[in-house]
Image (spheres, helix red, strand yellow):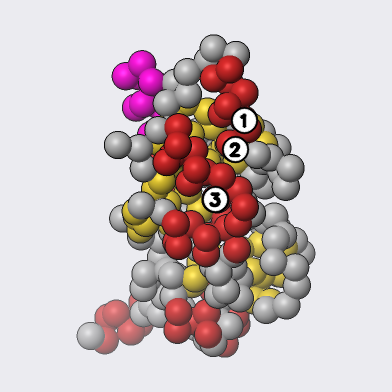
Amino acid sequence: MAELVFFSGTMDSGKSTLALQMHHNHAARGRDGVLFTRHDRAGAATISSRLGLTQQAHEVDDSTDFWSDVISRRTLGRPVDYLIGDEAQFYTADQVEQLARVVDELGVDVYVFGISTDFRARLFPGAARLVELADRVEILQVRALCWCGARATHNARTIGGTMVVEGAQVVVGDVEAGADEVGYEVLCRRHHMRHMTAATARASSPSPQTLSSAEELSI
């Protein structure tokens, strides 16, 4: 029986890697699928993993209609057994409803991957609708880590290493942004609420937590 499954996790938790692995596994068993993405950091129409894996995909925009897309492909004689959608937090609520309809009425498996909350810890509209409609919500088991070593649960937007809490909900950036660029950092809830990134933590406690040679000899 077909399912709509939402795989959720913070940045750096391996969502795109899993999306590409799932596509490989299904295709290797002779199933026909279609890949979708939106606002990937590597550019349009691409699913990219931080491990270096990339795959061409169809770019989603506000005019994309998943129901019409699958109907069109099947009308042209192409079987569609599954859809894989990356960066699903950027899909509209209507598009999530289209995906649910594709599952229920056409028997197509739909696997979507994305983060749930934005840099303000507010649900993205697409992610919120997925939580409401998905047959299953899977939390990725690969744990991204905050700079303190605790499990990272929130995505922070940064400029020059400093956390910002105002701005547009969708701004494309990466965890490896330059000093003056918009970037993102994963934090535990405690440090997200304190607005404390790795850079601000280093600034407030510049002394390394190591012993000097003299200190080592005195122990």
Q: Residue at x 59, y 37 (%)?
A: 66
The front one of 74 and 183 is: 74
Graded by Cα atoms within 10 Å as few (under 14), some (14 to 19) or many (20 or more), the crowding at tag 3 reads some
Q: According to the image, label 2 marks what residue?
A: 66
In the depicted structure, whether residue 81 falls above or below residue 128: above
What residue type is disc 3 on? Glu
The front one of 136 and 160 is: 136
Look at the image and give the residue range highlighted in magenta: 21-31
Query: Is 2 situated left or right of 168 in this image?
Result: left
Q: Quadrant of residue 172?
A: bottom right
Say the numbered circle drawn on residue 97: 3
Rounded to the nearest whole Å, what is the CA distance between mark 1 and mark 3? 14 Å
Query: Is 160 situated left or right of 30 in this image?
Result: right
Q: Residue at x 72, y 60 (%)?
A: 171
Q: According to the image, label 1 marks what residue?
A: 69
Q: Residue furthest left?
A: 219
Q: Residue furthest front?
A: 105
- Find out whether residue 23 is within the magenta segment: yes
What residue type is disc 1 on? Asp
Q: Quadrant of the C terminus?
A: bottom left
Give the main secondary structure of the magenta stretch: helix
The kind of secondary structure element at disc 2 is helix
